[in-house]
Image (tube, helix red, strand yellow):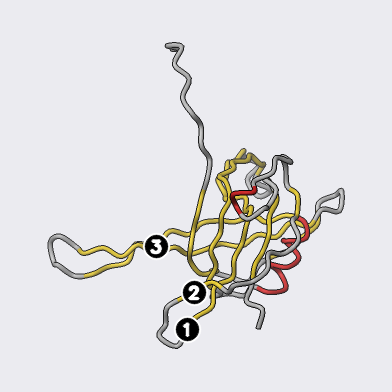
Amino acid sequence: MSTGVRLPELNQVMLTGRLTRDPELMSTQSGIAKCWFSVAVNRRYQDKVSGEWKDDTAYVPVVVWRDAAQRCKEKLRKGSPVHVEGRLRSRKFEDKTSGTQRTVVEVEARRVQILIATESGAEVSGAAQPGEGAGVGASEKSHAAGGATAGEAEIEEAPF
């Protein structure tokens, strides 16, 4: 049912959490590097009945492409604190064991920033120079987002 009203569309994701396992790296048939990992993101809340504080954890799959994929594989490990910016993407595939069609929703990262733990336990980002862009799609410039090209992924880390 179309009413003629055009809604603005936005697909932007920002997550801060820790890797649940070491990143996996592979290459597509055309030789493009693809790295994927999962990030655990916690939400702390107080149980209304008991008053006890609890954690609700979401496990979010993340995909990084090209040069940034290589850097993620080299620099990240299970438990690494990261900040990820990107977009949601869904894809369909055939399950090899059952032969059924499956759909997965994942974050296609445009930027991955490695966070550094301080002595107080707080996490801060390193004031690092952005890495080289790794194109994953569109080529529009996004100067407001640190000069990275939209659809390009970058990874940042502390310079020490």
Which kind of residue does numbered mark 2 sit on? Val
Mark 1 or mark 3, whichever is nearer to me: 1
User: Which residue position holds label 2?
Assistant: 124
User: Within 10 angstroms of label 1, few (less than 14), some, or many (20 or more) residues?
Assistant: few
State whether residue 150 is above or below residue 134: above
- Residue nearest the observer in this picture, 141 or 63: 141
Which kind of residue does numbered mark 1 sit on? Thr
Q: Position of residue 113 (x, y in %)?
A: 59, 66
* Cβ–Cβ under 8 Å for marks 2 and 3: no
Q: Earlier in the sequence, mark 2 or mark 1?
A: 1
- Residue nearest the observer in this picture, 112 or 42: 112
User: Within 10 angstroms of label 2, few (less than 14), some, or many (20 or more) residues?
Assistant: some
- Look at 44% across and 16% down and name the residue there: 5
Q: Earlier in the sequence, mark 2 or mark 3?
A: 3
Q: Position of residue 67 (x, y in %)?
A: 77, 60
- In the rendered image, the quadrant that contains the C terminus is bottom right
State whether residue 42 is above or below residue 93: below
State whether residue 92 is above or below residue 55: above
Which kind of residue does numbered mark 3 sit on? Thr
Q: Is residue 65 left or right of residue 84?
A: right
User: Which residue position holds label 1?
Assistant: 118
Q: Which mark is residue 57?
A: 3
Using the numbered discs, state the Cα–Cα distance from disc 2 to disc 1 in whole angstroms. 7 Å
Mark 2 or mark 3, whichever is nearer to me: 2
- Look at 42% across and 82% down and name the residue there: 121
- Look at 68% across and 68% down and name the residue there: 129
